[in-house]
Amino acid sequence: MTTHLITSLQQKLKQLDARGLRRRRRTTDSPCAPQVQVDGVTKLAFCSNDYLGLASHPLIIAALREGASRYGAGSGASHLISGHSRAHALLEERLAEFMAPDIEAVRTLTFCTGYMANLAILSALTDRDTDLFCEQLNHASLIDGARLSRASVQVYPHGAVDQLALMLAASRSPGKMVVTDSVFSMDGDLAPLAELLALCEQHDAWLLVDDAHGFGVLGRHGRGALEQAGIRSQRLIYMGTLGKAAGVGGAFVAAHESVIEWLLQRARPYIYSTATPPALAHALLTSIDLIGGAEGALRRTHLANLIGEFRSQLQLQHWHCLLSETPIQPVIIGSNDDTMAAATRLYEQGLWVGAIRPPTVPVGTGRLRITLSAAHSRAEVAQLVAALNALQA
């Protein structure tokens, strides 16, 4: 007999179906790449966050294999017990060296995911005497981290620096932190980091920057949004993910050495989680070298050219593409049903594009979240553009 609890969940699932909001997974049988085997069929994918095309890079694969041979399959414990391997230590040192031009007295700490890193920062560095000033379009991990913290949370409108200035000026809390994405993951636009840092300097506040979609992509050397904005400060707390442009997995926090030491002592998501497999850290050493080297520069140049060609060739009549200089190119359609219908038609033509609906984006702004990669060719991008233009005919 079905219990009331199960019946209630089944009814809620039917409501999701009726509103076009049921999420479904597809299963891939090949490495992350433009040409991917999904549900047994080859598709041309424009939906991963592998912005530099490093997820299948032969040097990183070889490093992962070497790391597994040297360190084994798992870490066996949390970092503070016995799980902190030489590979983790070398990765944190390498990341600190990489980010040193952007943060004074920098030190880094690695995490299993960016989600965990954000929860750790916001729960460990705030208390009831802290005011958090959160960007309206922040990622779910920042929203949940703010909820988990004991701080007072205020949300400022998207990009509204003037409004934020008034809110900071009115705050009487001894602790203040401005919290923002660098690249907004569903819109692709950039936060005004230089202006935000200036406000934080004026009002003695921390600036927490989630650069999940900027690290490896933005900046001349791929150091991300801080390098792109040309800012440097002890007030910066920087979170970068290692499973997107870096092509592997995990995340890191870069900040003043005192901030990192406090996180190591008090951040519960770090203290009470088993460390990532050391082989991943070993592979990431190669990834960081590629990002910061000549090959990374070439891949960023190719990616920038693809973005320019995509935008110049796209001719939308009923939909519109948001302005973005990043690999994230959202095409706004509107209703959930129309968004899903467009994604389905593309899929039937061999093109895999993500369909994004509420609550990830506001009601009425369902969209195709197109993501470009340095692994894509000009011909593959042209194929996508032709299909999008044809859907509008």
Image (cartoon, rainbow, N blue to C red):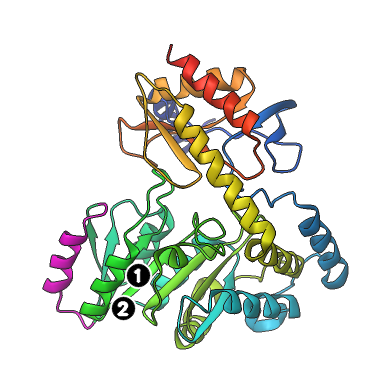
Disc on res. 366: none
Q: What stretch is highlighted in magenta?
A: 158-174
Going by the image, does 362 lie left or right of 203? right
Judging depth in this view, the residue of 175 and 3 nearest the camera is 175
Give the residue at x 67% y 83%.
81
Residue 312, x across and y down, in percent: 45, 31
Residue 167, x across and y down, in percent: 15, 66
Of the image marks 2 and 1, the number of the one nearer the N terminus:
2
Q: How crowded is mark 1: few (under 14 residues within 10 Å), some or many (20 or more)?
A: many
Name the amino acid type tagged 1: Ser
Residue 347 drawn above or below residue 254? above
Disc on res. 149: 1
Going by the image, does 200 lie left or right of 322? left
Rendering quarter of residue 231: bottom left
Going by the image, does 197 lie left or right of 113? left
166 in the magenta segment: yes
Disc on res. 127: 2
Residue 56 drawn above or below residue 35? below
Give the residue at x 46% y 38%.
329
Residue 269 seen in the current view: yes
Rendering quarter of residue 42: top right
Name the amino acid type tagged 2: Asp
Identify the secondary structure beneath mark 2: loop
Residue 5 drawn above or below residue 263? above
Give the residue at x 53% y 66%.
223
As measured in the structure, the alpha-carbon distance from the residue carrying label 2 to the one carrying label 1 is 7 Å
Judging depth in this view, the residue of 298 and 99 nearest the camera is 298
Give the quarter of the figure containing the C terminus: top left
